[in-house]
Image (cartoon, rainbow, N blue to C red):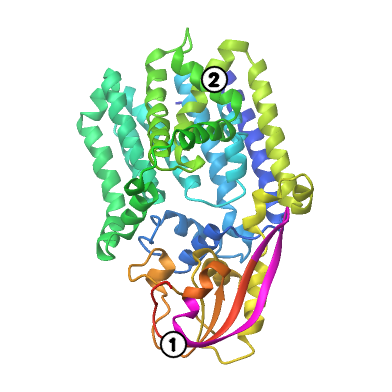
């Protein structure tokens, strides 16, 4: 549907601003000396062997990294999809905001999303949340269109986006819960969900997901087991402090004014605007956040687990802030978000500057890995080792990326029979290995060393990480691996 001239102008202005932010983000990715976060290194390794599934995540993240690293072997190439997909998500949110409240809300929504503190941080990394948010935005827009349009193109688009989102992260299943709640509170949504078009959305999504489900079935359902372990309901804490800390963290992720605007919209939907579409946006934001707050109370929850809620929350918050203070509150919110974004850029380009500002802790897990890789590579050339082994998933992932090229295979040591990560599942250290270069943290080495006939300490690595943090690892020359031994 063509946009009127004034709406077209707002769309192109939003596009120009979002593209400018994205270009700067790409420049920062190329300029940063920060190394791969452990999860990023793991995704890069997955991308070397594209598959329909991996131990802890569905496969879409690995496919994306495979695509972006075909021609460039660099950290920025691993991450480049993140700012690009976030840009696409921002422009889709323009369309969602325009559909719900008009082009003015759409314009501010695109800018608000692009400068959210959580998005500014996320755009500097590649993670499963990035394609999840893009797919959620596409699916939500298609759902809104299908709700008032009897054609089949929107349900089909919604089904494809829903299925791809499930291949990004199983949190996409929350979309089904939100759609169900939308059907309860909104008659057009109910007609869609209970029609053949609604059935087609679900069947198409499950068809796209089915190869991953088959992969899980053939590997003992590791992704489902990992997801359950993350929820950790078997060791429930019922901790109010955890829940309060999670809620406080959401004010940081979403921005304080945006969060207040969203809460205000829940309390009193913006007057003079379409109430039915606002209720749909509530259905696609509030239930997700409530579920994760409950999860944080029962056990624990990371701040990013509620991220899908903010796709629908952004237009709601923008509409409320516009009602409260026209554009003044939005300008203030954008100012805060922009300041955080620039501070993150400065820290990414100059970790030393971040360390002097007391923010070095935010980047410590992206430093020191290249030095570790160089030390292990140098030591591996001094003797005839059969394998390099580590027990820590992060260390294994980083060695796979930074200890290159190498002629010695990297293996994962583990005392447990049932694997707890992808490396333990696919590249375990096997009993009978004659000579191993062990890489271990102080807390891990006693159990590791007990599983060998003999060993010798080669060196102790102390790698500074900024803000007075250090990464301490020891290298051992270990002989004849007897298999994992019980902890002493």
Does the segment drawn in magenta span residue 380?
no
Q: Is residue 405 visible?
A: no
Could you tell me which secondary element the residue under label 1 belongs to?
Answer: loop
Which range is magenta? 448-471
Residue under the point 67% across and 39% down: 21
Could you tell me which secondary element the residue under label 2 belongs to?
Answer: helix
Quarter of the rendering containing residue 176 = top left
**Looking at the magenta stretch, what is its main secondary structure?**
strand
Q: Nearer the viewer, residue 161 or 374?
A: 374
Residue under the point 26% across and 40% down: 202
Q: Nearer the viewer, residue 266 or 372?
A: 372
Q: Which mark is residue 205?
A: none
Residue under the point 52% across and 27% down: 314
- Give the mark, 1 or 2, whose residue is nearer the N terminus: 2
Residue under the point 63% across and 21% down: 330
Rendered location of residue 139, percent (x, y): 39, 36
Rendered location of residue 211, percent (x, y): 29, 57
Quarter of the image for the C terminus: give it.
bottom left
Q: Which residue is mark 1?
A: 433
Q: Which mark is residue 261?
A: 2
Answer above or below: position of 42 versus 342: below
Answer above or below: position of 413 versus 77: below
């Amino acid at each position: 549907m063509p946009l009127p001239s004034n709406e077209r102008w707002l769309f192109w202005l939003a596009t120009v601003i979002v593209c400018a932010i994205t270009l700067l983000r790409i420049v920062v990715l190329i300029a940063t000396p920060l190394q791969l976060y452990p999860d990023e290194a793991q995704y890069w390794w997955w991308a070397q062997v594209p598959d329909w599934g991996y131990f802890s995540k569905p496969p879409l993240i690995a496919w994306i990294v495979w695509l972006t690293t075909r021609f460039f072997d660099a950290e920025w190439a691993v991450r480049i999809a993140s700012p690009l997909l976030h840009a696409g998500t921002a422009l889709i949110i323009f369309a969602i905001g325009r559909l719900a409240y008009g082009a003015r809300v759409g314009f501010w929504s695109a800018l608000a999303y692009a400068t959210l503190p959580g998005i500014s941080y996320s755009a500097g990394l590649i993670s499963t949340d990035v394609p999840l948010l893009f797919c959620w935005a596409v699916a939500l827009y298609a759902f809104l269109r299908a709700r008032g349009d009897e054609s089949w193109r929107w349900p089909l688009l919604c089904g494809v986006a829903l299925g791809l989102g499930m291949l990004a992260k199983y949190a996409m299943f929350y979309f089904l819960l939100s759609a169900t709640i939308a059907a309860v509170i909104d008659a057009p949504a109910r007609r869609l969900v209970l029609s053949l078009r609604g059935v087609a959305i679900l069947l198409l999504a499950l068809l796209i997901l089915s190869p991953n489900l088959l992969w899980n079935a053939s590997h003992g359902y590791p992704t489902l087991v990992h997801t359950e372990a993350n929820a950790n309901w078997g060791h429930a804490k019922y901790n109010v402090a955890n829940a309060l800390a999670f809620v406080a963290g959401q004010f940081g992720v979403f921005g304080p004014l945006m969060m207040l605007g969203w809460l205000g919209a829940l309390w009193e939907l913006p007057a003079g605007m379409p109430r039915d579409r606002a209720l749909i946006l509530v259905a696609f934001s509030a239930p997700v956040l409530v579920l994760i707050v409950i999860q944080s109370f029962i056990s624990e929850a990371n701040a990013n687990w509620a991220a899908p809620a903010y796709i629908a929350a952004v237009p709601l918050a923008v509409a409320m802030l516009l009602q409260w203070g026209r554009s003044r509150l939005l300008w203030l919110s954008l100012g805060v978000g922009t300041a955080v974004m620039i501070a993150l850029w400065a820290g990414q380009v100059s970790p030393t500057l971040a360390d002097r500002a007391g923010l070095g802790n935010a980047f410590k897990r992206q430093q020191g890995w290249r030095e570790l890789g160089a030390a292990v590579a140098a030591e591996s050339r001094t003797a005839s080792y059969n394998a390099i082994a580590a027990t820590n998933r992060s260390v294994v992932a980083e060695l796979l990326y930074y200890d290159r090229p190498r002629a010695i295979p990297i293996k994962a040591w583990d005392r447990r029979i049932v694997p707890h990560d992808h490396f333990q599942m696919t590249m375990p250290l096997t009993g009978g290995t004659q000579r191993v270069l062990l890489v271990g943290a102080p807390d891990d080495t006693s159990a590791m060393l007990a599983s060998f006939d003999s060993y010798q300490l080669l060196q102790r690595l102390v790698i500074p990480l900024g803000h007075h943090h250090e990464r301490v690892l020891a290298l051992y020359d270990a002989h004849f691996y007897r298999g994992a031994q019980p902890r002493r």
